[in-house]
Image (cartoon, rainbow, N blue to C red):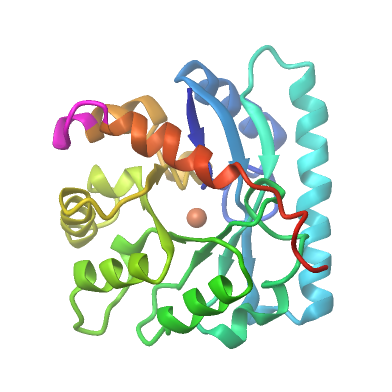
């Protein structure tokens, strides 16, 4: 009954899957691995887009999503499919154009999946506080991969959670997919109880870790039942609320 909120399996819209066949193949594999709900999260690179560009990009995502839903309907097995985004925003100013928009959000809901990018100098506090001030929830993507400019990642993430952020770690980090530091930080965050969910961040062939393999890794480093909390209940909790109360 896993739920994956962070992946790049929507074809032809970012640096993830490049064809419908590839997408359908992964959807089938995810379903066989026990993933019953999947939210596509194509990149929305706010620093590179003006308001017209954001609108066009969201429309491109929607068109690709509708094509996948149509194709998956006649395919033998696929999870329940929803649409979201992975929003790149390093400052409150960068997230401002979408923070009140009902067109963005995980599965069309109130929660935003946000990444701070891999360069140092991002202002996590301003982004988190701006999203929370709008009455929305924020899920911070892969904190184990950021450059903290010498600050302690675990202490930083603990503060982000105090300010109301939810924390999403990549399954591949637990398996040393990126580099040793990401593995060390992700395991420290797990040990400190600072992780709310683990997702695949699957980019097609480029991210080879299957959901069932990730669940096994979580159970190997954490207490029994932890995979259920981080791959079922955590992701489903942020899908549960709609954005209908938001101002357009
Ligand atoms: Fe991603």
Q: Viewed as shown, does residue 126 lie left or right of 213?
A: right
In front of the other: 122 or 107:
107
Check the picture and name the quadrant holding the C terminus.
bottom right
Residue at 60%, 87% in the rendered image:
93
In front of the other: 28 or 40:
40
Residue at 51%, 47% in the rendered image:
6
The image quarter containing residue 155 is: bottom left
The image quarter containing residue 174 is: top left
Residue at 18%, 50% in the rendered image:
187
In front of the other: 229 or 70:
229
Q: Viewed as shown, does residue 186 lie left or right of 6?
A: left
Residue 178 in the image: state x and y as whole percent.
29, 55
Residue 87 in the image: state x and y as whole percent.
59, 65
Residue 179 in the image: state x and y as whole percent.
23, 58
Q: Viewed as shown, does residue 35 lie left or right of 178?
A: right
Q: Which residues are magenta?
A: 219-225
């Amino acid at each position: 009954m896993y739920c994956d909120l962070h992946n790049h399996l929507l074809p032809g819209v970012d640096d993830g899957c490049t064809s419908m066949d590839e997408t359908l193949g992964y959807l089938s594999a995810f379903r066989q691995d026990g993933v019953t709900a999947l939210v596509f999260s194509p990149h929305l690179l706010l620093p590179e887009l003006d308001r017209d560009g954001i609108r066009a990009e969201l429309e491109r995502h929607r068109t690709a999503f509708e094509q996948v839903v149509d194709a998956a309907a006649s395919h033998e097995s696929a999870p329940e499919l929803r649409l979201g985004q992975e929003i790149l925003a390093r400052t409150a100013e960068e997230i401002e154009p979408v923070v009140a928009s009902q067109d963005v959000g995980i599965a069309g809901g109130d929660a935003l999946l946000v990444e701070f990018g891999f360069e140092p100098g991002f202002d996590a506090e301003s982004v988190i506080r701006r999203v929370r001030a709008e009455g929305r929830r924020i899920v911070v993507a892969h904190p184990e991969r950021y450059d903290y400019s010498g600050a302690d990642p675990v202490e930083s993430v603990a503060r982000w959670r105090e300010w109301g952020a939810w924390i999403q770690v990549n399954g591949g980090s637990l398996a040393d997919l990126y580099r040793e530091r990401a593995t060390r930080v992700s395991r420290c965050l797990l040990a400190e109880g600072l992780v709310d969910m683990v997702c695949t961040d699957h980019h097609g062939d480029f991210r080879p870790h299957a959901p069932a393999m990730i669940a096994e890794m979580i159970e190997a480093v954490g207490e029994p039942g932890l995979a259920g909390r981080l791959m079922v209940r955590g992701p489903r909790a942020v899908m549960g609320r709609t954005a209908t109360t938001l101002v357009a």
